Image (cartoon, rainbow, N blue to C red):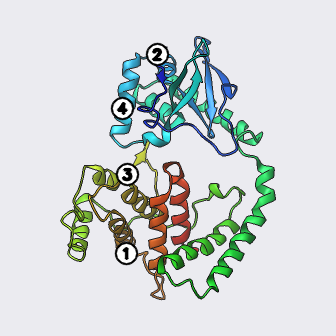
Amino acid sequence: MEQEIQLNEHNKAEYPPIHTAGFNPSLNDVIIYQTEDGEIKMDVKMEKETVWLTQAQMSELFQKDRTVIGRHINNIYKEGELYRDTTCAKFAHMGSEGDQKYETLLYNLDVIISVGYRVKSKRGTQFRIWANKILKDYLIKGYAINQKIQLEHYQELKDIVRILGNTLKNQEQLTSEQSKGLLAVVTDYVYALDTLDKYDYQQLTIEETTKGDRFHATYENAMEAIRSLKGKFGESELFAHEKDQSFKSSISTIYQTFDGVELYPSIEEKAAMLLYLVTKNHSFSDGNKRIAAMLFLWFMEKNGLLYHTNGEKRIADNTLVALTLMIAESRTNEKDIMVKVVVNLINQNN
């Protein structure tokens, strides 16, 4: 039986709850899965446009001991293959007697697939095929996305952004460079909305990007670049002082592959992920945002993409400052949308 965690002030922040705007988590959001041989039948939780299983369910599905499943999951997170805060969540429910609140840990399809590969289970492949079909049907039927509402508000959203941009641009009191940079993000983002095939702004596409790296970032050459920055901002002994091994992980993550295919195949995607990871991981005791912005420019320049043919930067300095601040203030479940915003502001359409 899956371990249940009694909700209290000490553990309720350890794992993020499952939440999706406009979608109420409920035990009724369950689909029954049965293996092809009929040996296994289980209830599969559906939420946040993916499916979720407990460790106990994965143990049953893959016919492996619960401790084996737990060890693989821990290694997946330890090796940086997946991030716990976006793939693991807790689901609150009442005990059998209805007088105690408990929380059960669930893991999404990314974790399930990864564990399936590690235990070399044919059932993992069968489950993935089934889950993808179910999720496709789920989306088409509109249970995960209310398409009608998105259509109604799409043009209104674009108009509001344009009006806001024009109004702020004409205000004489807007003198802060960071405010102007934030404005540039908002107004430039309108073009991305115009190119969407889907109307949900959180479904930005990655397109018009540059394949084939001219330059490969490593921990060593990145640290060399950071040391040159330290010469400029060396007033603090803590500046660029590594707190842990997370910076090495950030560098390796942008070149991560799955089944031989790069997860971030373009230069723009790698640059955006580098900016995001260095900003959010807080790998250094001081200067994380400055280091992140510098490494972003460094990576773009080394790959020959920092400047247009006319010598103008693809992204203005104040826009980069604003983007870095936005990333720093964003929630972890907003990672994908933040990365896609950055890519759409530096791709070949700009």
Q: CA distance from mark 3 to mark 4?
A: 17 Å
Mark 4 residue type:
Asn
Cβ atoms at labels 2 and 4 below 8 Å apart: no
Residue at numbered disc 2: 63
Could you tell which of marks 3 and 2 lies nearer the N-terminus? 2
* Residue 189 to residue 99: above or below: below
Numbered badge on residue 301: 1
Q: CA distance from mark 4 to mark 1?
A: 37 Å
Mark 2 residue type:
Gln
Q: CA distance from mark 2 to mark 4?
A: 18 Å
Could you tell which of marks 2 and 4 lies nearer the N-terminus? 2
Numbered badge on residue 88: none
Front-most of 225 and 283? 283
Q: Position of residue 140 (x, y in %)?
A: 75, 42
Could you tell which of marks 4 and 1 lies nearer the N-terminus? 4
Which secondary structure lies at badge 1? helix
Quarter residue 199 falls in: bottom right
- For residue 350, say whether it is visible: no
344 relative position to 117: left or right? right
**10 Å neighbourhood of mark 4: few (<14), some, or many (≥20)?**
few
Which secondary structure lies at badge 3? helix
**10 Å neighbourhood of mark 2: few (<14), some, or many (≥20)?**
some
Residue at numbered disc 4: 74
Q: CA distance from mark 1 to mark 2?
A: 50 Å
Please identify, in this view, whether the residue under mark 3 or under mark 4 is nearer the observer: 4
Numbered badge on residue 253: 3
Cβ atoms at labels 1 and 2 below 8 Å apart: no
